[in-house]
Image (spheres, coloured by chain):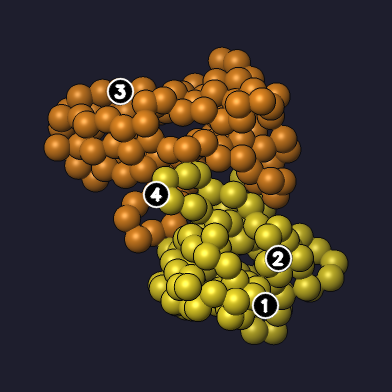
């Protein structure tokens, strides 16, 4: 079965700095990849997803992620973060419909 | 649209008690899901439904039951609460499967003592 490892549990960064949140997955078949964001006391919200096609995926709020099949990675990036980006970010993988596995999450803290 | 709503927001249960977590969506989505989120962990799928009258187990179904009598509602039942079920429960819905955007409710925080 598929699994996800988020390599950093916490990432502190200063406002307007670039950020990368790392995600590696394990699967023996083709996968679909997702990044979700969770703001405090809220449910998850989809940032972006990779289903097929271009390996560079652009999402909401200026985030993007690159699917790297050879390195089994799907890292999330933003060139310049804002205070409002402070949240928990989850990487998720799916091999088939109705079966999604989430990573443990990365807490991004943006400092002024 | 209200989206996905969940009730209650917070509940304390004693071991062995039962309760139903309510979930309603007003987007006419076919698919609905229940997840649990333990501290410091990602979400795990408990049960899902592909339409009224059809439900199936996810990754961690033990100790839970679901039903789907209407498109809008997808309640989650805990029959004999155990401390291991202390968690935050999220309901979600999507139009056609997990590969489409899932819309999440605000969650129900459950404490079993």
Q: Residues within 10 Å of mark 3 (few under 14, many from 20)?
A: few
In space, the residues marked 3 and 2 are separated at their CA atoms by: 41 Å
Q: Pick whichever, A92 or A85, lies toward us.
A: A85
| A36 and A74: which is toward the camera | A36
**Circle on res. A79:** 1
- Where disc 4 sits, the SS reads strand
- Rendered location of residue B37, percent (x, y): 39, 49
Asked if labels 4 and 2 touch by Cβ distance under 8 angstroms, the answer is no
Q: Residues within 10 Å of mark 4 (few under 14, many from 20)?
A: some
Shade of chain B as shown in the rendered figure:
orange
Same subunit, tags 2 and 4: no
Q: Is residue A70 left or right of residue B107?
A: right
Q: Residue furthest front?
A: A112
Which residue lies under the disc numbered 2? A62
- Marks 1 & 3, CB-CB < 8 Å contact: no
Q: Nearer the viewer, mark 2 or mark 4?
A: 2
What is the secondary structure assignment of the residue under circle 2? helix
Label 1 crowd bin: few (<14), some (14–19), many (20+), radius 10 Å: few
Q: Quadrant of residue B50?
A: top right
- The residue identified by callout 4 is B37
Circles 2 and 1, Cβ within 8 Å, touching? The answer is: yes
Residue B81 in the image: above or below residue A59: above
* Chain at tag 2: A
Disc 2 versus disc 4: distance between alpha carbons? 27 Å
Q: Would residue A101 be visible to someone looking at this image?
A: no
Q: Residues within 10 Å of mark 2 (few under 14, many from 20)?
A: few
Q: Is residue A49 above or below residue A56?
A: above
- Which colour represents chain A? yellow
Q: Residue at x 38, y 59 (%)?
A: B41
Disc 3: which residue:
B19
Residue at 59% x, 49% y is: A45
Judged by depth in the image, the label closer to the viewer, 1 or 4, is 1
């Amino acid at each position: 079965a598929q699994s996800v490892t988020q390599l950093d549990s916490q990432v502190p960064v200063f406002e307007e700095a670039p950020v990368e949140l790392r995600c590696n997955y394990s699967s023996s078949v083709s996968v679909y990849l997702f990044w979700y964001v969770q703001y405090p006391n809220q449910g998850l919200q989809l940032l972006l997803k990779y289903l097929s096609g271009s390996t560079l995926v652009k999402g909401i709020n200026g985030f993007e992620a690159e699917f790297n099949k050879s390195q089994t990675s799907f890292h999330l990036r933003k060139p310049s973060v804002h205070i409002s980006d402070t949240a928990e970010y989850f990487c998720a993988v799916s091999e088939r419909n109705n079966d999604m596995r989430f990573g443990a999450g990365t807490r991004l803290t943006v400092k002024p | 649209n209200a989206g996905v709503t969940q009730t209650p927001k917070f509940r304390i249960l004693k071991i062995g008690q039962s309760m139903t977590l309510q979930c309603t969506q007003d987007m006419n989505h076919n698919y609905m899901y229940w997840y649990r989120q333990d501290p410091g962990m990602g979400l795990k799928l408990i049960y899902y439904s592909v339409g009224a009258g059809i439900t199936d187990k996810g990754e961690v179904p033990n100790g839970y039951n679901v039903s789907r009598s209407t498109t809008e509602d997808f309640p989650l039942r805990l029959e004999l609460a155990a401390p291991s079920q202390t968690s935050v429960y999220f309901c979600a819905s999507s139009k056609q499967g997990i590969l489409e955007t899932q819309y999440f409710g605000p969650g129900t925080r459950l404490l079993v003592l």
